[in-house]
Amino acid sequence: MTSGTPQISLYNTLTRSKEPFTPLDANNVRMYVCGPTVYDFAHIGNARPVIVFDVLFRLLRHVYGAEHVTYVRNITDVDDKINARALRDYPDLPLNEAIRKVTEKTEAQFLADAERLGNLPPTYQPRATDFVLPRPDGKPDMVSLIKTLIERGHAYEANGEVLFSVQSMPDYGQLSGRNLEDNLAGARIAVDAHKRNPADFVLWKQSSAEEPGWDSPWGRGRPGWHIECSAMSAAYLGDVFDIHGGGLDLIFPHHENEIAQSRCAHGTHAMANVWMHNGFLQVEGQKMSKSLGNFYTISQLLDSEDFGGRKWPGEVLRFAMLMTHYREPIDFSVRRLEEAQNILHKWRAPLRHGSVSRSHVQATEVPPEFLKLLSEDLNTPAALRYLTEVASRSFGVSVGTESPSNLFHPSFNQLWSALQLVGVDLLGYEVMRDSRVEMAVAERLAALNAKDFAKADAIRNELAEQGIALMDYKDEAGQRQTKWEVKR
Ligand code: AMP
Ligand code: ZN
């Protein structure tokens, strides 16, 4: 850690408290985040963990050095939902081929969406299907992990399945705070008759001839969901690593069971030291989810006009997400996106007015206060509010006013650098959109000055349809000027 960088503190779900973060090895800070199951487009709720942990990745790189951070986010490409989708979409293809089509297409879409939202690619993005069987490179794999669990008395075969025995682990349930009695109460005894304990969960299950399967010591079958992440995290990060993340819904059963598998297989006191969980993105108080049908896909927001009647640039979606602390729920609304759009629009004013030229924008020291707020359990809303102060103080951009006369480079570079640190590019492609609006506004002013009111009104109406509101005013020299902002 370089001097002058603040201490990072993170809220740890495992201890239910905010703790100073100390990596196991400052030369290799290691983080694992559960990635998507690739059977369908990702919705904007799925984008939340991607963005939140990208911000943490960037902060860790800033503090420890880019080459000293390893971030793994897996791709789950074996799942019964994938099989169902393959059968539905490619009924005439052999299942394996159909599955490959579904997963390759969905994975490519996910990576493209993630990039357009300003996320760096993780260091490694392993696919689950590459870690089912023992590997030529000797990296940990699912079958070997399950064998070890059986040998150590933590798993058993029953009814064609291999199950993890929760009673074999005295402190099972620490992460979610559930004890075994809680789990018993909710269990369906009839369905689970072959289990020693109703909370026992599947490590391996048999596949029928039509289902995807791998030959294993327990017959042809496929892995349970949780074991994937135990194998892939161990493969790239070792038996114990620093940070494990995902959405709140993953605490139980997924993360609880990952911990059980990894700790029991490796005989360790921990799988990861810090467990972090983002809150839900909600629509009218309900979690956005496929099953509720209340979702907007990322590409729908970027490329169609389905949400609020217009397209939303990636920077705006990302900024809107960061206006809320990652552990709080977000209520996703057009209003929130407009607010984000307007703040970015104001911060770009020096570029529009030409007092800062793109070619002079360069990386500079991130304001220490910004870094400090970000380091306090990723307090992005406070950090962005601080930038609002910086912007209004140093280059006179605040709500309702733009005074292009006193803009200067150093503070714009500070603002730009701070935003880069959280992955928002102030020079992003949205500036293009701005310049198109600028041109239309200038054309309308010319029409007004030429008393061509019909043309001026037509341009105003056209912009209004795109959600752009115009406000005319006179400048100090008494010249007619126009300000614009995004509104509905
Ligand atoms: P899934 O594809 O459902 O396994 O979700 C992938 C990731 O997105 C997981 O980390 C989930 O916790 C997260 N996630 C799913 N829905 C939401 C939501 N509405 N808000 C925030 N995170 C979500
Ligand atoms: Zn996982």
Image (tube, rainbow, N blue to C red):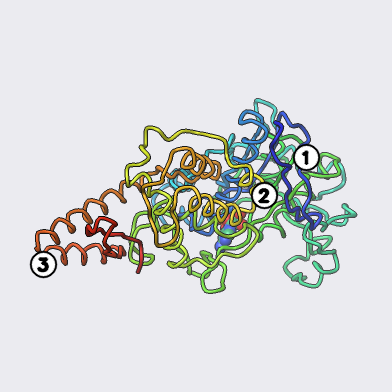
Quadrant of the rendering where the C terminus is positioned: bottom left
Amino acid of disc 3:
Ala
Q: Tell me: is circle 3 under 8 Å from ligand 1.
A: no
1 vs 3, front mark = 3
450 vs 414, left or right, is left
Could you give the CA–CA distance between mark 2 and mark 3, rounded to whole angstroms? 57 Å
In space, the residues marked 1 and 3 are separated at their CA atoms by 65 Å
Question: Residue placed at 39% from the left, 44% from the top?
Answer: 428
Label 2 near ligand 1 (CB < 8 Å): yes
Disc 1 from disc 2: Cα separation: 16 Å
Q: Tell me, yes or no, if residue 141 can be seen here.
A: no
Q: Is residue 44 above or below residue 419?
A: below
Point out the residue furthest to the top here: 137
Per the image, the residue denoted by label 2 is 245
Query: Which x, y percent locates residue 376?
Result: 69, 50
Give the residue at mark 3. Answer: 454
CB-based contact (under 8 Å), mark 1 and mark 2: no
From the viewer's perspective, is the residue at label 2 or at label 3 nearer?
A: 3
**Residue 15 on image: x %, y %:** 81, 55
Pointer 1 residue: 22
* Amino acid type, label 1: Thr
Q: Compare marks 2 and 3 and give the one earlier in the sequence.
A: 2
Disc 1: CA contacts within 10 A as few (<14), some (14-19) or many (>=20): some
User: Mark 2 Cα within 10 Å, few/some/many (few <14, many 20+)?
Assistant: many
Q: Quadrant of the rendered structure where residue 253 is?
A: bottom right
Viewer-nearest residue: 163 or 12:
12
